[in-house]
Image: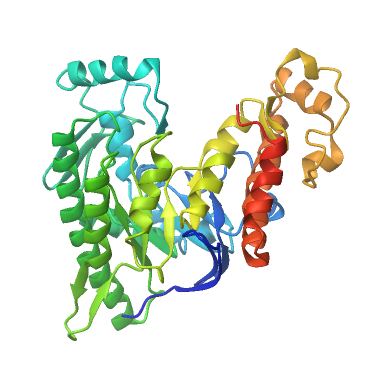
Amino acid sequence: MSSSIKFEIKAKIKGSLGRAGLLSTSHGIIETPAFVPVATKATLKSMTPEQIVSTGAQVVLANTYHLYLQPGDELIRDAGGLGIFMGWNGPTMTDSGGFQVFSLGAAYGKGISKVTKKGEQEDELLLANKRDRDERPQIATVDPNGVMFRSHLDGSAHYFTPEKSIEIQHNLGADIIFAFDECTSPLESNHYQREALDRTHRWAKRSLDHHQKLNNEKAVVGVGTPTALFGIVQGGRSEILRKESAEAIATMTHMGADGVTVGFDGFGIGGSFDKKDMTSAVKWVNEILPEEKPRHLLGIGEPEDLFSGIENGVDLFDCVAPTRIARNGGLYTVHGKINLTNAKFTRDFSKPDEACGCYTCQNFTRAYVSHLFRADEMLAATLASIHNIYFITGLVAGIRQAIVDGNFAEFKERFFEKYNPV
């Protein structure tokens, strides 16, 4: 079955891997590079679909693990699929559930997230990782065939295999889904990174085979539209493993009954990164992955990381950070992050961000939104989230236009003349 997506490169950054393109899906065209807000449980926390549209967001990503547990993927299938269920008319994506292997297993209780920073804590984390491997709670356990995990809702036991993840994602009905993988901590040993990478590649092949089987079954009965599958590149902080993974996933194929060979429709770059090494890891991978297919950097969304990723060939990003920090009073501005719960904003009657055109900044002051947070009003999270998603999607849209106009370097320089990422 032919791919359900089409990707066209429209412009490139001279002297780098960066590009601007158009990604066509069954539910609309995504202008890339693009930021993908995360609607974990079929909702972008505190925002309606209309509010999401108002931020300029083109596509949303939901979480397979969470939707499988609640309300259930079959219920969403019977409701007409993710987009209809949540009232979103644009393109949709779902992750594979692989990151939960990391967050409930290797990262559980360690304070390790998608991006770690080198420094004083690294040696301490390395020691803790070794000491606790056999002692940590068995919330998620990996074996050669899949992952056993316990629900964070009720403690019930569940088992994900590549085939199970693909079936759940097909039930959810997103335009783009991801192969099942194992996300590893950057603090894991080289030996474990190798074991996990080999396992991820075996799971990728099983994901691809089962995905094609389900797409073919859809075609035979004439139900639904074909779904696009992205393979995930892993490999931790190792240049050798990252490049090996890119080669393996880029060349992996499925042989159909009709003799036609198909590969992945696009690629995800996964893993938990060291902040300092992320740019290198992305470049290693994208120098190998086929240029004509889209690339998605999973779980990354800070402004400085967006510039770096785009310059090194990334087309799509998803991240919970904009809404997560918003719910805690954090806002992106042209000068860097601020936190409206700080006392200095109590009587600040200026716009949340002087250069912003979002609904929040056009109608409210820092003092008002600060008041909402102090009063524990639900509207606080909504207004802050609208602003942060607008800021990040607008920034990426601006980068895209700069690529098209041929002035990416100048745009980047102007941005960081003002922006302080600290």
User: Which residue extends farthest left?
Assistant: 144
Which residue is rendered at x = 22% and y = 20% of the image? 136
Q: Is residue 94 visible?
A: yes
Percent x, y of residue 323: 59, 37
User: Which residue extends farthest right?
Assistant: 349
Residue 354 picture quarter: top right
The one of 77 and 32 positioned closer to us in this rendering:
32
Q: Is residue 351 left or right of residue 166?
A: right
Which residue is rendered at x = 39% and y = 15% of the image? 120
Q: Is residue 208 above or below residue 178?
A: below
Percent x, y of residue 41: 47, 44
The one of 72 and 263 positioned closer to us in this rendering:
263
Which residue is rendered at x = 63% and y = 53% of the image? 409
Residue 45 picture quarter: top right
Q: Is residue 333 left or right of residue 264?
A: right
The one of 402 and 103 positioned closer to us in this rendering:
402
Percent x, y of residue 361: 81, 39
Looking at the image, what colour scheme do you see? Answer: rainbow
Q: Is residue 287 above or below residue 385?
A: below
The one of 208 and 67 positioned closer to us in this rendering:
208
Q: Is residue 39 visible?
A: no
Percent x, y of residue 138: 20, 26
User: Which residue extends farthest front?
Assistant: 15
Which residue is rendered at x = 72% and y = 18% of the image? 374
Residue 148 picture quarter: top left
